[in-house]
Image (cartoon, rainbow, N blue to C red):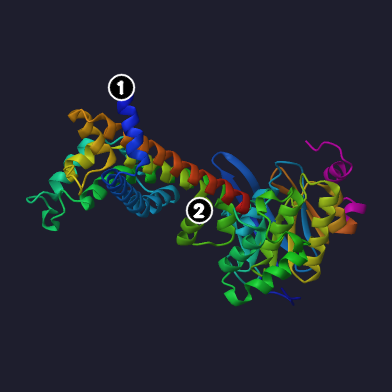
Amino acid sequence: MTMRGPTSDLPIVLENVGFSAGASHILHDVSLAIPSGGPTVVIGPNGSGKTTLLRILSGLLVATRGCIAWGTRDAVPERLAIVFQRPTMLRRSAAANLRYALRAAHIPRAAHAKRTAELLALVGLEAFGERPARRLSGGEQQRLALARALARDPTVLLLDEPTASLDPAATKSVEEVIRAVAARGIKVVMTTHDLGAARRLAADVVMLHRGRVLATGPSPVFFSTPPNADVATFLAGDLLL
Amino acid sequence: MGNSDGASAISLVLSADPALMEIVRLSLAVSLSAVFFAALIGIPFGALIALTRFRGRDGVIVLLNALMGLPPVVVGLVVFLALSRSGPLGSWGILFTPQAMVIAQAVLVTPIIAALTRQTVEDLWAEYRDELTAMRVGPAGRVATLIWDARFSLVTTLLAGFGRAAAEVGAIIIVGGNIEGFTRTMTTAIALETSKGDLPLAVGLGIVLIAIVVVINAVAWMARVAGERIAG
């Protein structure tokens, strides 16, 4: 994985994107531009549509309305990766999970050993390469999932609640990896309902509520001067109904 | 069965009686071959059903599950008719040979392996779907990954198939003919010797049959436990 320059996969532009599952409308007229640069953090209460938005960006779900452009493309870029809130480890060692992802990304076999070692080192799991992936702790599995996503050398990395249900030490480790990834020029788009994590990591913020974009803005301004009363309520820790 | 019959049976087993050993060898060769061929067909077929959606899929699953209960004598009869001189496969000339017995047992075992594989792979697919889709793994890669990662569960599936093959008598007695020294297996020999009143050989074969099934299950279980410890 190398430090990268501007990519043609950005900005990601959503125009009036909606998503319905049966009679349930999960996203309504979401219009956004996700620029290159530091991490974009999508915040909002549970059920606000954060995960659905991320899945649409990854191509796992198809928007039922509106359109999306990933830079100059209208299809999901090849070098886009996603890490789920509860990543599933394949039933093999940590290193074998990475080799699997490298094969899936069509990385030449000759490069697998070096890349696997690099990725394990990046997420601080050098000593755990031969350990069964499913026996790792929650935080270690989350870091391994990050490394696995990075195997395809992505230009855009989507993270769904990457620190949910982790203890503070594991959260710190995962956040350090996210910072390292962002510092290498990979665009990180992550969801969280942890406002502390959003403050620590975000370059810009998108707030969703009931499937609609409530506000967007650069992180320091967003948190210091909430753009509207609902955002202020949420940032104050009060219930947003 | 008197005490002397029991003692004779144990003596036969302990002395590794050549006739007994030949029957044991043939039984294992036929049943293991049948499970091998049934696995070659049943595992990919079961995985394919698990991963694909098509019209009539529910009907195929119900049929596959129902076929797990195929009566061995019916399978024996169908294979007999297919392999008999006037049957569609009569030109193969393999009726009353071990090959015919392998075919009959493979027909019996394939639905068991396919149906259990389908369930196992479908359960694992529910767990892996998002990750493999996100990694852009193609259909063939998905099947291979799921079969590999379900390998420890599939060992149990193969054991169920082997148990069915090793225990059945109805199909192989019809297509094999129970010819001494050629197509006589443990189960057909037990049936024959019991009807003749030669209980020591029947009991000896019964002991060996049960012991083999226990040993194979024990080895498979140890392999599964060791494998899970290594792979997680």
Q: Position of residue A119 (x, y in %)?
A: 72, 67
Residue B2 visible within the image: yes
Quadrant for residue B163, please give it.
Answer: top left
Q: Chain of mark 1?
A: B
Name the residue located 31 percent from the left edge and 32 percent from the top edge: B8
Q: Are marks 1 and 2 on the same chain?
A: yes
Name the residue located 17 percent from the left edge and 45 percent from the top edge: B179
Residue A239 magenta-highlighted: yes
Residue B188 magenta-highlighted: no
Mark 2 residue type: Leu
Horizontal side of A63 relative to B169 (left or right) equals right
The residue lying toward the viewer, choosing from A189 and B78, is B78
Q: Which mark is residue B146?
A: 2
Report the quarter where the N terminus of chain A lies.
Answer: bottom right
Mark 1 residue type: Gly
Q: Position of residue B15 (x, y in %)?
A: 35, 42
Q: Chain of mark 2?
A: B
Report the quarter where the C terminus of chain A lies.
Answer: top right
Name the residue located 31 percent from the left edge and 37 percent from the top edge: B205
The residue lying toward the viewer, choosing from A106 and A208, is A106
Residue denoted by label 1: B2
Quadrant for residue B60, please give it.
Answer: top left
Q: Position of residue B134 (x, y in %)?
A: 59, 58
Q: Which residues are magenta?
A: A222-241
In the image, farthest residue toward the right: A224
Identify the element where label 1 is drawn: loop
